[in-house]
Image (tube, rainbow, N blue to C red):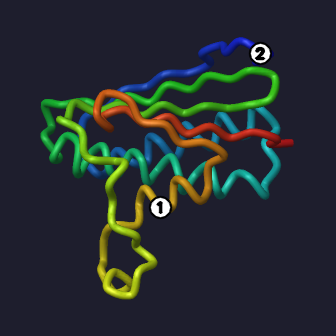
Amino acid sequence: MEASYKEIESVSFTSDIKNVSIAETLVDGICRDNDVHEDHYGNILIAVTEAVNNAIQHGNLEDLTKDVTISVKQNSEELCFTIKDHGIGFAFDNLPDPTAPENIEKESGRGIFLMKSLADKVSFENNGAEVTLTFNNLK
């Protein structure tokens, strides 16, 4: 049976790309406070900042009147980061493969691929305007 989750942190900020640093600081503190092994820290940092970057740029279209919210919850085995924006979402289950030959040289289109590669679980709600990244076995 899955242990229940407890929310340990939540932060909201405007959709300014400079505010990705807020997400970085949050990840630093969460990882430090939870003794996350350094081997996992980089995966968490990259996946969360990629999700925040997508929320700012693609979800909220860098509209400074719209916020991005990150909430963090944990149980005895997992850390979960949920990133929410106010966008209309996207077809998260129908994305082009960034490793396909026709996409290799494109400058964008790797964010979801990265998140799925680095997190143990990635789930989308609200048509993709909310993504939850789950990381386990972190010590």
Q: Amino acid at mark 1?
A: Phe
The C terminus - image quarter: top right
Residue at x 68% of width, y 41% of height:
135
Q: Where residue 111 appears, x then y in whole percent?
A: 41, 60
Q: Amino acid at mark 2?
A: Ala
Q: Which image quadrant for residue 118?
A: bottom right
Q: Where residue 40 appears, x then y in whole percent?
A: 74, 52
Q: Nearer the viewer, residue 138 or 62?
A: 138
Residue at x 39% of width, y 45% of height:
52
Q: Where residue 70 appears, x then y in whole percent?
A: 44, 30
Could you tell whether 45 is left or right of 61 in the image?
right
Decide: is 56 above or below 3: below
Q: Residues within 10 Å of mark 2 (few under 14, many from 20)?
A: few
The N terminus - image quarter: top right
Q: Nearer the viewer, residue 79 or 122?
A: 122
Could you tell whether 28 is left or right of 131 in the image?
right
Could you tell whether 10 is left or right of 27 in the image?
left
Which residue is label 1 attached to? 113
Q: Nearer the viewer, residue 9 or 6?
A: 6
Decide: is 99 above or below 58: below
Decide: is 123 above or below 101: above
Disc 2 element: loop
Q: Residues within 10 Å of mark 1 (few under 14, many from 20)?
A: some
Q: Which image quadrant for residue 133?
A: top right
Residue at x 42% of width, y 36% of height:
124
Which residue is label 2 attached to? 3
Q: Which image quadrant for residue 33?
A: top right
Mark earlier in primary sequence (1, 2):
2
Residue at x 34% of width, y 44% of height:
19
